[in-house]
Amino acid sequence: MNMDFDLSELVLEVEDVFGFSIPEEDVIGLTTLGKLYDYVIAHRFRAKQDACLTSVTFYKIRRALMSVLKIPRDAVRVSTELLAIIPKRRRKTWRAIEKTTGFRLPYLRRPRWVVTTATVAAVALGIATPVLLGLKPFGGGIAVAIVSTAVFGLIFLYRLTEFLAYEFPPDVATAGQLAKATLARNYQPIVAESKKSATDAEVWEILQRTVGEQLGVQPDQLRKQTDFLKDIDLDLLGRAKVTP
C-alpha cells in the first residue's frame, strides 16, 4: 500500500457523516470496509446519548470553522486551542459560526481591564453626580443618587464596551470545550436533530459513498472485504485505486 494513504483522514470523514467519535485505539482495528461498517452499526446510536451529542455538536462546529476560516479538517481537533485558529476578528467569526451552525454560542467576554475600568468609572460617576447637583453630603437622598447613578452608568458603559467583548470564556479554551458549552445552550434542538437514524442498508450505502468520495473511487467498487491496508493504493497522481 502507498504510504501516502491516511486511514485517520478517512475515519475523520466517517465521524463527520455519522456524528460520533471513533477513538484512536479503535481505528487500528478498522482495516477493512466491513469492519468499519460493523463498527458504525454497533455505535451509530451513541448520538442519542449526552456524551455523543457533544460529538454531534463538535462535528457541526468543526464544519463551520472549516468553512468560515478556510482551514482543513485536521486543523480542528477536540484539543485544538481556539486562540490558535481564531486569533483575530473573533466577534465577526463568532457571528459567522452562529449563522452557519444555527447554534447560540457562549458569549464572548470583555477583558478584565475593561470590566475594572467600567466599574471604577461608574462608581466615580455615581459619587460625582450628587456633588454636581449640589446635594448635601449627608442628605437622605445622596446614597440613593450615588447608587442609582452608578448602576445606570455601569449599564451604559457595559453596552458601550460591547465591541470589546472578544475573549473566550475561561471554560471554552478548546474546540472540544466549545462543543460542550454550545450543547448546553442548544440541547433541545440538537437532540431533535440527532433523532433520525439510518437502516443497516442505508448505513452501508452512505459508508460506500463516503469512503468512495474520500478515495476518489466508485462506491460500487468497494466491498466489505476491501482491505484499506492491502487493496487500496495510490497512483503517482495521488488517485486511489482498488485492487480487485
Image (cartoon, rainbow, N blue to C red):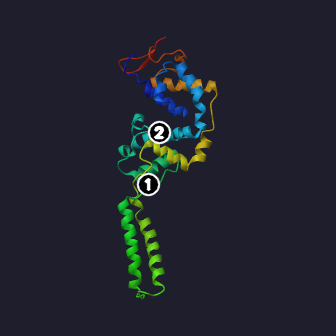
Secondary structure of the residue carrying numbered label 2: helix
At horizontal 53% and vertical 32% (from top left) the residue drawn is: 17
Tell which of 121 and 216 is nearer to you: 121
Q: Is residue 19 left or right of residue 234?
A: right
Disc with the residue nearer the chain's start (2 vs 1)? 2
The circle drawn on residue 108 is: 1
Q: Quadrant of the N terminus?
A: top left
Above or below, 139 against 158 in this view is: below
Secondary structure of the residue carrying numbered label 1: loop
Above or below, 197 against 86 in this view is: above
Using the numbered discs, state the Cα–Cα distance from disc 2 to disc 1 in whole angstroms. 20 Å
Indicate the position of residue 44 as horizontal and vertical percent values: 58, 31
Q: Is residue 82 left or right of residue 36?
A: left
Q: Residues within 10 Å of mark 1 (few under 14, many from 20)?
A: some
Residue 64 in sight: no
Judged from this view, the residue extending furthest toward the top is 244
Indicate the position of residue 84 as horizontal and vertical percent values: 35, 43
Circle 2 residue: 63
Above or below, 163 against 142 in this view is: above
At horizontal 63% and vertical 38% (from top left) the residue drawn is: 195
Residue depth check, mark 2 versus mark 1: number of the one nearer the observer: 1
- Looking at numbered disc 1 in the image, what kind of residue is underneath it? Leu
Tell which of 206 and 37 is nearer to you: 37
Residue 142 in sight: yes
Above or below, 64 against 157 in this view is: above
- Looking at numbered disc 2 in the image, what kind of residue is underneath it? Arg
Judged from this view, the residue extending furthest toward the front is 138
Q: Residues within 10 Å of mark 2 (few under 14, many from 20)?
A: some
Indicate the position of residue 118 as horizontal and vertical percent values: 39, 67
